Amino acid sequence: MTRKIFITGGRMSPVFIRYMASLTGKSQPKICYLPTASADDPSRINEWYRQCIVAGVTPFVQPMFISSYTQKQSFEEVLLGMDGIYVSGGNTLNMLAIWKAHGIDTILQQAWNKGIVLAGGSAGGLCWFEHGTTDSRPKEITRIDCLGFIKASHCPHYDSEESRRPRFHAYIQSKEFKAGYACDDDAGIFFEDNQVSKVVALRKESNAYYVYEKDGRVVEEVLSKELLA
């Protein structure tokens, strides 16, 4: 079974949702939104429903702040019954802690191995990598260790937050980070079995990059992309 992950650098978009849905190979895929990083923010959930309508995708949502009185299916039953799972942006550190407490990290690995498409932007893209840059703590951008499905580092918001790029470069140069991938907000990368399969973007100015250290300096390669309509 091919393992699939689609990440973007920033915001959610109906175009990206439609592209993710196409990766399932289903004509009417079931795509579930995990809004944990945003603390199940109702406004973001409403935006997910709105964007799915625009994208022509049937939306599902699995909140983490639930009660056994109101949810009768297990998280495993819900998530492993989907064709795709889209993770929201927000606080990556808090999200990972909540997932670990509920066993969601293990369920997501099962989903990935089963061929369910995993996706997300910002925190929802970062979480699949071994480590990357996060704003989940006070004062400054710091390192975070994540799920490690993709064997590389990651930096989201590469073009929209001015501290991200130099911080990522510093971690790469010091070899605290493995070589990895950075994404502008409107760019995305589709990975199949840990290999880059395709790079897409909403705008010609938006890019994804492979960033690595060579002879003591940081090298940044722009990856060839396709514009999505």
Image (cartoon, rainbow, N blue to C red):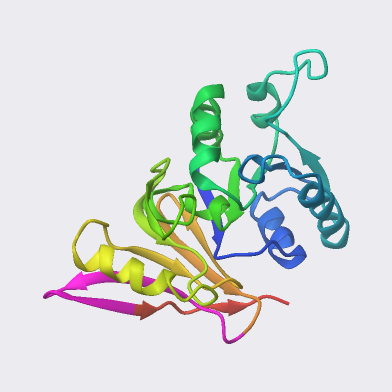
Look at the picture and state if 141 lies above or below 71. below
Look at the picture and state if 103 lies above or below 199. above
Residue 219 among those drawn in magenta: yes
Using the rendered view, name the quadrant where residue 102 is placed: top right
Residue 189 among those drawn in magenta: no
**Is any part of residue 110 visible from this angle?**
no
- Give the main secondary structure, helix, strand or loop, of the magenta stretch: strand
Image position of 228 (left or right of 161): right
Using the image as rendered, state which of residue 116 and residue 109 is in the foreground.
Answer: 109
Look at the picture and state if 43 lies above or below 64. below
Look at the picture and state if 197 lies above or below 26. below
Using the rendered view, name the quadrant where residue 186 is placed: bottom right
Quarter holding the C terminus is bottom right
Residue found at the very far left of the displayed protein: 215
Query: Residue 75: x, y in percent?
Result: 66, 24
Using the image as rendered, state which of residue 174 and residue 223 is in the foreground.
Answer: 174
Using the rendered view, name the quadrant where residue 78 is placed: top right
The residue lying at 66 percent from left, 56 percent from top is 20
The residue lying at 72 percent from left, 40 percent from top is 40
Using the image as rendered, state which of residue 50 and residue 31 is in the foreground.
Answer: 50
Magenta part of the protein: which range? 204-220
Query: Residue 91: x, y in percent?
Result: 56, 48
Query: Residue 131: x, y in percent?
Result: 36, 50
Image position of 58 (left or right of 75): right
Query: Residue 41: x, y in percent?
Result: 75, 45
The residue lying at 49 percent from left, 50 percent from top is 136
**Is any part of residue 96 visible from this angle?**
yes
- Image mark count: 0
